[in-house]
Image (cartoon, grey):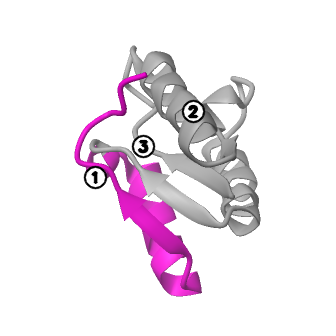
Amino acid sequence: MKIYIAGKITGDPNYKSKFNAAHLSIVYQYDVPINPALLPAGLSKADYARICFAMIDTADKVMFLPDWQESPGARLEMEYCLYTGKDIEILPVIPEV
């Protein structure tokens, strides 16, 4: 199962550790994590959105980290998931590995 990780990246200095914890949790519990925190720096917001929507389309499920509502990008991803009927899960806490 392919799981896309959604959550706050911009403005969160600890986003890499948070996304890495979710990434490892998916490896242990499911199969394939799709992690937008691994994308290169320096792209425009529109570029990231296009890439992330394609990643979401590829995923079987989207896992939203607890802080997703603090991120305009993650809120947009939620709307996209709801619009397209993508299976979603909202985590109450960051996974511990």
Magenta-span inclusion, residue 9 = no
Q: Is residue 78 left or right of residue 60?
A: left
Q: Give the x, y percent position of residue 65.
A: 37, 44
Quote the CA–CA distance across marks 1 and 2: 19 Å
Q: Residue at x 52, y 74 (%)?
A: 87
Q: Amino acid at mark 3?
A: Gly
Q: Amino acid at mark 2?
A: His
Tag 1 residue: 69
Magenta-span inclusion, residue 77 = yes
Tag 3 residue: 7
Q: Is residue 32 above or below residue 13?
A: below
Which part of the image, by quadrant, shows the N terminus?
Answer: bottom right
Neighbours of disc 3 within 10 Å: few (<14), some (14-19), many (20+): many
Q: Is residue 97 left or right of residue 86?
A: left
Mark 2 or mark 3, earlier in chain: 3
Mark 1 or mark 2, earlier in chain: 2
The span shown in magenta is 68-97
Q: Is residue 24 left or right of residue 93?
A: right
* Mark 3 secondary-structure assignment: loop
Q: Give the x, y percent position of residue 55.
A: 72, 56
Dot 3 and dot 1 residues touching (CB under 8 Å) = no
Tag 2 residue: 23
